[in-house]
């Protein structure tokens, strides 16, 4: 047990973890980005004045993952895959 | 007359009092819908310090998942598997048992007990986290006001909210021309509560729901025929995995008609007459069943929400249109789960529930849509996460395949449960894990390790360098990772 603990203390993992807790990037209000699963980058139109509560508007250099370079973005599910999951694998026949 | 007047006045006063009280109900966040997306969002919001309410009209919390979906189906799958094992798989294990029979009432009671405990558990969690639970149908009065039309045990209320989260879920998609009666022609809801084992069960749809329900009733003695429009079963599974799944289920007795376009499904007395067009042979085939399960998917559910009152937008599949922060056209009205974009999975909705609340709190939330696992709880189980071979080929990404069969895994051998394999897809240059597909015992649990690997951007070498306990099924996972760039030890 003691030997294991000693070995663990010296061991350097090959995977480099960032560790936590992760800092929460503050939100900068900007143009809305499409949801990753939205077909054809569909966006809601904007209604008039209605303000969310609780959001901070402090300026920090982060806006959205979607405006970062491509390697930071998530690979979106394809519409066909979403369809397949939603339909349970069957297609509605009209 | 006087008496009548007094009663009328009493009612008027009573209504006025209720309304007056109702108008005073103000919350920071109101969640409409108490399913896996909604209840998780409500609890998270309360934990982050918001005065939170959740409106649910079903009478119990947990949504489709807990009441008529994931949970009851897993109870039936587990218990039907036990029954089937006792019937077919005890002798070889040296266990002599007498005759095993199904007591359908108790079989269903076991399911209902699990459902009751879990749905009741959410009510307890609401109390613990101080989420106000309104039992009733929530509908928009205006963009900051929700009317609660109470069901039994609920209270009339008009709720004012700074933020609203719509999480109203989905319902079974009907099949055009086929009338559901939930007795002979049923949806998945009916398939969870059949009163007797149908001799012949036909299923339209070879996806997860159809195959899980087919497995349950096949184990209990039904002759199950699956009619699938596509040329493969499995709801977006990796092609090789889908073929293996079909092979194993065929061995269990399920029949498959693929490339079959259903044209008719009509109840005639106690029989359902079905016709489909065999698209390969170009001929019409007729068959009869005692019960027909229609499992062609689900559609968003917004009935009674009065979304039109505030002009919420829907796409052509009736999904609420949102942006990347789950905002609808109103910044303070967000929408998550089955009723909006993406796969209709309970765990996807849960992730979105947390993220939506975090967006409200911090302006930042996180859901990795490239890392949402799928599981089919057949036997053997099927689970996958990340990309399939077909997707990688289409994207032109070069990859290596690593596989390890459970027949070579020591724990699977000791359990005499050796069907299936683990399959890794890794970037051919960096060894980064791109997708993991498992068919085999415990696949649904094992896929979590693949999810961690994907999220951390691990390589298959990283996984193969992690010590996995012996003897466990998870050693097959490690050995499959090794197989992508080297050789497994035990095969």
Image (cartoon, rainbow, N blue to C red):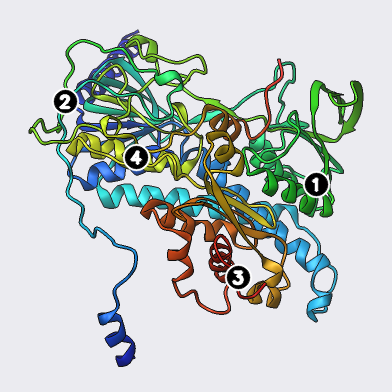
Which dot marks residue B93? none
- As drawn, the label of residue A71 is 4
Q: Quadrant of the N terminus of chain B?
A: top left
Marks 3 and 1, how far apart at CA: 45 Å
Q: Which one is in front, B479 or B377?
A: B479
In terms of secondary structure, where does tag 2 sit? Answer: loop
Counting from the top left corner in percent of width and height, residue B417 is at 71, 68
Q: Are marks 3 and 4 in contact (CB under 8 Å)?
A: no
The subunit carrying tag 2 is A
Are labels 1 and 4 on one chain?
A: no
State which chain disc 1 sits on. Answer: B
Quickly name the residue at label 2. A29
Up-down relation of residue A73 to residue B143 (above or below): below
To which chain does the residue with label 3 belong? Answer: B
Residue annotated with mark 1: B197
- Pointers 1 and 4 in contact (CB under 8 A)? no
């Amino acid at each position: 047990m003691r030997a294991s603990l000693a070995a663990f203390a010296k061991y350097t993992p090959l995977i480099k973890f960032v560790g936590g807790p992760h800092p929460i990037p503050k939100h900068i209000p900007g143009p809305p980005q499409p949801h990753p699963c939205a077909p054809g980058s569909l966006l809601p139109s904007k209604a008039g004045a209605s303000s969310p509560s609780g959001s901070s508007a402090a300026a920090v250099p982060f806006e959205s993952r979607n405006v970062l370079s491509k390697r930071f973005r998530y690979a979106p599910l394809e519409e066909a895959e979403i369809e397949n999951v939603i339909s349970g694998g069957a297609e509605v026949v009209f | 007359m006087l008496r009548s007047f007094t009663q009328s006045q009493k009612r008027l006063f009573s209504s006025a009092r209720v309304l007056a009280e109702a108008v005073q109900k103000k919350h920071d966040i109101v969640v409409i819908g108490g399913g896996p997306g909604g209840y998780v969002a409500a609890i998270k919001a309360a934990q982050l310090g918001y005065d939170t309410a959740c409106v649910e009209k079903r009478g119990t919390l947990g949504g489709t998942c807990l009441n008529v979906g994931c949970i009851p189906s897993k109870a039936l799958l587990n218990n039907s598997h036990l029954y089937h094992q006792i019937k077919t798989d005890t002798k070889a294990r040296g266990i002599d048992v007498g005759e095993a029979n199904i007591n359908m009432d108790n079989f269903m009671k076991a399911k209902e007990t699990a459902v009751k405990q879990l749905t009741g558990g959410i009510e307890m969690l609401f109390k613990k986290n101080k989420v106000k639970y309104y039992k009733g149908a929530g509908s928009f009065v205006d963009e900051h006001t929700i009317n609660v039309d109470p069901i039994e045990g609920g209270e009339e209320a008009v709720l004012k909210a700074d933020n609203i989260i719509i999480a109203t879920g989905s319902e079974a998609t009907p099949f055009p021309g086929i009338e559901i009666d939930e007795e002979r022609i049923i949806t998945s809801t009916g398939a969870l509560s059949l009163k007797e084992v149908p001799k012949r069960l036909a299923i339209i749809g070879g996806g997860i729901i159809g195959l899980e329900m087919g497995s349950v009733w096949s184990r209990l003695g039904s002759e199950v025929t699956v009619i699938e429009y596509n040329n493969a079963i499995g709801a977006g599974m990796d092609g090789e995995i889908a073929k293996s799944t079909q092979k194993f289920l065929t061995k269990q007795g399920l029949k498959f008609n693929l490339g079959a376009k259903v044209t008719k499904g009509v109840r005639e007395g106690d029989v359902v007459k079905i016709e489909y067009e065999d698209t390969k042979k170009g001929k019409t085939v007729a068959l009869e069943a005692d019960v027909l399960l229609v499992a062609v998917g689900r559609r968003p559910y917004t009935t009674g929400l009065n979304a039109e009152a505030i002009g919420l937008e829907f796409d052509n599949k009736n999904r609420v249109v949102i942006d990347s922060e789950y905002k609808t056209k109103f910044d303070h009205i967000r929408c998550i789960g089955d009723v909006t974009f993406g796969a209709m999975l309970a765990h996807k909705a849960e992730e979105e529930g947390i993220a939506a609340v975090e967006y409200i709190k911090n302006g930042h939330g996180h859901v990795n849509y490239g890392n949402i696992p799928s599981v089919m709880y057949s036997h053997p189980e099927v689970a996958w996460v990340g990309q399939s071979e077909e997707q990688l080929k289409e994207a032109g990404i070069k990859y290596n395949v690593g596989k390890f069969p459970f027949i070579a895994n020591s724990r699977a051998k000791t359990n005499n449960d050796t069907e299936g394999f683990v399959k890794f897809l890794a970037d051919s240059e960096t060894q980064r894990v791109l997708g993991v597909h498992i068919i085999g015992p415990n696949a649904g649990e094992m896929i979590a390790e693949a999810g961690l690997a994907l999220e951390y951007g691990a390589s298959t070498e990283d996984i193969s360098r992690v010590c996995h306990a012996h003897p466990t099924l998870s050693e097959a996972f490690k050995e499959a990772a090794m197989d992508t760039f080297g050789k497994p030890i035990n095969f």
